[in-house]
Structure formats: structure tokens, C-alpha cells
Amino acid sequence: MLFLVAALLCGGYVLRHDPLRGTSDLRDWRAQSTLLTDRHGRWLRLTLAQDEQYRLWTPLERIDPRLREAILMKEDRYFYYEPGFNPWSLLRGAYRTYLRHRHPQGGSTITMQLARLLWNIDTRDPRGKLRQIAYALDLELHFSKAQILEAYLNYAPFGRNIQGVGAASRIYFGHGVEGLSLPELLTLAVLPQDPGQRGRIDRDGNAALLAARQRLYAKWREHHPVTAAEDAALRLPMALSSVAQLPYHAPWFVDQVLQEERTRALLRQGGLPSELHTSLDLAMQRIVEGQLHAFVQEQQIKGIRNAAALLVDTRDMGIRALVGSANFFDAAIAGQVNGTLGKRSPGSTLKPFIYALAFDQGVVIPATVLRDVPTAFGPYTPENFDSRFEGPITVTDALIRSRNIPAVDVAARLHHPSFYDFLRAAGITGLAPESHYGLALVLGGGEVTMQELATLYALLNNDGRLRPLSLLAKNGTDQSAGPRLLSPEASYLVLDILRQNPSPLVAPTGQARDLPVAWKTGTSSGFRDAWSVAVFDHYVLVVWVGNFDGTANPALIGAEVAAPLLFRTIYALRASGVGLERAATPMPPPRLRRVDVCLSSGALPTVWCPRRGKSWFIPGVSPIAVDSVYRPIWVDRRSGRAVCPPYDPRRHELRVYAYWPSELRQVFAQAGIPRARPPAPAVCGSAGAAVDGSAPQIRSPLRGLTYLLGPTGGEQTPLHLSADADGDVARLYWFAGSTYLGQSASGQSLEWRPQRPGTYRLRVVDDRGRADSRTVQVALRP
């Protein structure tokens, strides 16, 4: 009668209050931990829930059925038959607790224990016990037995701040609940009954835990056959791992994943998933970390204290390794900062994309000869890193040797998109307006992160398509197409050039020396950042060496410190057998063609060209012209002077001369390289006009730019006028409209200080009467 009255009272309480009204899932009742694994399921980190508990939700179907059976055997044998409470168990508990004054025994069912856990009910007095029964009845009304058991298994206490079988199995045994051994599952089954005592970590084993497990084992044997090996194992002490032993791998990467997932969860007004299967490869991560740490240790004598590295698989854009600093736990170098997210000057690492755009816009081909000579681009006068000038240099050599002036020259000729527009389209954030940089953006005037740089280089390996980096694992390789920013042809050409850059290290024994690696270095202004980036097989590897506080160090040169670290890491990855997948030999896109060129000019060869070679060519896009450097001239055999027709083979002969532009002749002279000067053209006919040679070509000012000039030291900033002149020219004469501005020697520039803003028509005439003209816009600062 007493229990009937109690049940009626409890039922009335439930009907009146119904604390579970509107609740459909008990998983969301408590904050959950998150288990992060690498792409192969290897454990990276188990996080604390918001209430500082380890609580990892595990669906019932993933929990070993033997563990479920063992827990019910220990806690509630009649779980599937009772309505939420067991009157006989309650009577027995009350009798032993209050009449016999023995160790307190509550007689709670699984459902009642879940109610106490969910609502934090104090069940040490009859009133609390009745409230517990009431909530248990409510649970039975709203949820199935499977749902109740699932919630109990995920919220039950397992010692210290560990709740649920998922977290307990991970922390105590180092693996999930799917493959528990018999000793492990019986250990878990007895922990919730006395988690404080049985969950202690003792050096010699926990006697209370072992005794409880042996009692349950005796019952288990009554219903299940046990092997001799299991029996032997159950007689040994069970060593439980501690929270302090939890894995803490790839901390920079895991922190970034959690930060981004928390942001997404906030937007969708939900919580983090219980498991995050990331794109990281733990084996690769360990290799990259090891190489970077060892390298920094070796380089400390040079004052180098920090570095970072990033490895990306370009097939699915998954990050396979991320090392944010030389030591996560070293506060002296701000080790917990993720160096792959910091904005820094990229130095010359962006030059490949200038040439890729130039290939696509028909500005150059790989064999095009550029001028590495002193050049003023309006008020901007760049210099090379070594303060030297190479004279004529092909696009291929200019990129491999990272010459600054040719890169700026090519960038100045880009249009639709400009280099700045390309970077914006590629997702480079934080850029100032284009006018802030001018052409200095070419040489690292802007800032990028390592992750943005990796995305750019991955674009080259993905035929010019832009795809974002991925922190989470994807099923298979993601071949989804992103926006196309470069053509497959331009992407291939840039990588083909960068693969010709020789490795700074000798490949280790057993590794082929000709394995293709397309790589580039960069050094920021002031020696604050040393970079090196490689595209090899299916991967992009970016390394950075420097200091997070921006401290300058003359040792921070990309080719000298970052490049060796880059190749040491590549060689270590290839030698490790960690699953680094080799790619087939890169094949050119079918649209590309090979053409004969004159090596001195990069143009189509004439019969007079002494050295020929091959170059890639994009039909319908690439610029192409006939070589004009080597020209035949009829000269007098004795005097060497040019002659007029008719030619007499007995007195005259045909000689081939190289007509180098004046600025290149000047570089040759400075380098001590003799170059024969072509003879002056013969004046033939009554008009006395020159019949041979090329007209001068204005190089500065550039077309389509507005020059903003301001006062400097009390005088107006000069605009430098320069032009390429033929090899037979000594003087150039400059005009603005009909106004004579002055003269300059061939190969020299003329300073012009316009006094008023406006549009000017500049004209240059050489001393042979040949001319060129250009319109320029001038604006003056007040």
C-alpha cells in the first residue's frame, strides 16, 4: 500500500511538472567533449566539455554489447521490465540503510540513476528519493529503454572528471568502446558504483577496483564461456591511464580546427560534434615537426629561434601537417602562436604568379629575353637582391634566379587582371588599395599568410583552379572545380620553370636525384622573413624561418636557411614510407606547343641567328615575332663600312651583326664583355635617308599610368625619360608636344620636371631620324 501511494504521488508530480516537455534528445542535456582524429583515425586530442568534464557521446550501437550486458548485470538486471523504479530494490535499500544502519544502499534503477545525474538530485533523504522516482517515470514516458540506456552510458560517472563509457574507455585504455577486451569492459562496468574509490590511479594497482571486478567476473562466468587467456588476464591488476597521459598532437592545427568549428557552431546555434575527423596525417606531422625542431636547434648559433611549416595535399586540399612554431610550449618564442596564420611579407615567393599571368595575357613566353638593367618605373626604382644587373635574361632564368627588375617590368605590362586584382581574386585578405603598393607589390610589398601562400601554389598544381584549404577529412579525393584564375598552360609553364631550379642539397642515398620539385624562395625586406615553397608530387610544402616579433637577422635569407629546411623535410617524407603518394611525371597540356627560337632574343629565328633552342608556346595567346637582333649588312671588305647597292662580291661581303639595345650594351661594357658595334648604315639615294635599323622604343614613362609627382627638397620630383635605341645610335632628342626638352646619350635617361598637370605627348627622335611617341598623364601633389 505504501509503494502504491508513493507511485501515485510521483505520477501526479510528473503530470503536473513534466520537466521533459519539449525534450527530444538527451544528448544535448550536457555539454560534450570532442574527439579529434587524423585522417586515418589516429587520436589527436580529447577536449574538455564546457563544464570541465570529459564527456564523449557515443551512440548505443557503437558500444560493445558485452559492455552493455555487464553494466546491466551489475547495476540493474530488471532494467527492461521495470517502469522506471523497482519497489523491491527500494524496500531492500531502505531496510539496510535505515533499519539495519549498514552501508547506504539506494536501490536505484538505471533510469533513476540517470534522473539523478540529469537533475543533480540529492537522494540521501526520502523526499529526494521520491523526486528521483518522479523524474525516472517522466524519462520512461518520453524515451525508449534504448534511449535511456544510451544516455546513462554516456552520463554515468567513471572517476574524477570523466563521464560516460566513451570518455572513460579513451582515457583509461587509449581506444574507443568498439573493441574492448573482457578485462577492460568488466573494469568499466564496476566503476560507476563507486567512481571515487575505484577510479583512483595507484602505482601498484587499485585493490578496490580489482576486487569489484573479480566479483562481477564470477557472475559473468555463470553465463558466458571464458578463454584461458581471458581468465589469466583477469587475475592481473588493471593499470588505468591518467588524464595527464592524454594525447596532445599537432596543437596548432587542432586549435585552429576547434576555433573554426566553434564559430560554425555559434552560427548554427548548436554545439561541437562529438568527433571531428580531420585532414591531418599524424605520421607526416611527426616527421615535419621533427625536421623543423632539429633544424632550429642547429641554427640557433645564427640567432634563428623560430620556424613554421605547412604541408597540403592538393588533391583534396587537406592539410596533412601544420607546425606553427619551433616549440608549442616555449613561451620565449610565443610558441603557441600559429605561425601559418600570421601576415608577413612574402618576399619573392609571389613572382611565379606574375609570369603565369604574363603567359596567359600573351606578354611573354619562357624564352622571351628580358632586360635586367637599371630601370626607373616612374618614381619607383627597384634593385636586385645582389645589387647587380645581368643584362639580357630569359623569363626562365629571371624566375629561377629571382631577378627583381625583370619581374617588375613584366608586372607593369599586365592587364585584366593586374597582379593586384589576381591576388584579390585568389583570396588574399587584408590588402590595402592598389594605389598604396604600386609595383612594389611584386617584391613583397603586401602581406600574406602561409596558408594563403599554400593555396596559391596549390592552384598551380590544380591546373589554375582555386580551391580552399580543408581542415576536415573528405571521402576520397575532392575533385570539385573551383574558379579558374590561371590556364592549365600557364600553370604548367610556371611549374616547369621552377622544376629547373637545382636543389640546394644532395639527395640522400637511395633517393633519385632527379625527382621533380618545383620550388621558390623569398626574403622579406630587412631580413625578417625567410621563405621557401615547393610543389612536388601531389603536395605543396611551405616553410618559414624568422621571429614572430619581426626581429631582423641577416641570416634570414630564403635560399640559405628556408630552402635547406624545405628539402630536408621533403627528403625525410619520401624516405619515411608514411604514405606520401608519388605523382606521375607531369605532362604538358595538349594545347601547348614547342617552337624554335633564337636564344639571344626569344623570337623566331632567322637564318642569321647563331644559337637556337626550343620554347613552349600557347597558340593564339603567346607573343611571337621574328628576331631582329641579328641582321646582315653589306660592308666594304677593307674598311668595314656599310655600303650601298649594287654590291660587288669582290670588294664587298655580307656580315651579321648583333644590334643590342643601348642599355644592354652599357651593361656588357660594365661587365667587361666586349660587343662589336655595328657599322653606321650607309646613306643611299638622293634624299640621304637611312635605310636600315630600328626606331627607338620608349620604356619610361609607361603607357596607361598616371604619374603623381610631388615636391622633393624644394624641387619638383623628376620623371625619368628613357628609350631603347638601336646599336648605331649615339644621341636621343626628347620633345613634349612641340617643346624641346633636351637630349640624352644612348642608354641614358633624361630628367623632366613638368610644371603643370595634364596630358603630354612625348616624342623621342634618334640621331638617324627614327622616332617613337607616347601619351602620358601627369598629376601634381599640392
Image (cartoon, rainbow, N blue to C red):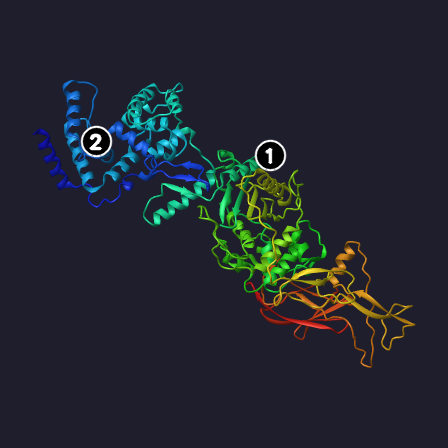
Q: Residues within 10 Å of mark 2 (few under 14, many from 20)?
A: some
- The amino acid type, in three-letter code, at marker 1 is Gln
Q: Nearer the viewer, mark 2 or mark 1?
A: 2
Task: Tell me where residue 89 appears, x and y as whole percent.
Answer: 17, 27
In the drawing, does residue 518 fall left or right of residue 102? right
In the drawing, does residue 148 fall left or right of residue 334? left
In the drawing, does residue 339 fall left or right of residue 575? left
The residue identified by callout 2 is 78
Task: Tell me where residue 400 appears, x and y as whole percent.
Answer: 66, 52
Point out which mark residue 300 bears.
Answer: 1
Q: CA distance from mark 2 to mark 1?
A: 68 Å
Please give the count of numbered marks on the rendered protein.
Answer: 2
Please state which of residues 174 and 340 is positioned toward the viewer in this rendering. 174
Quarter placement of the C terminus: bottom right
Task: Tell me where residue 314 appears, x and y as whole percent.
Answer: 52, 50
Please state which of residues 100 and 748 is positioned toward the viewer in this rendering. 100
Can residue 164 be seen from the camera position used here?
A: no
* Quarter of image, res 193: top left
User: In this picture, is 259 found above or below 652?
Assistant: above
User: In this picture, is 33 found above or below 375?
Assistant: above
- The amino acid type, in three-letter code, at marker 2 is Tyr
User: In this picture, is 138 found above or below 397?
Assistant: above
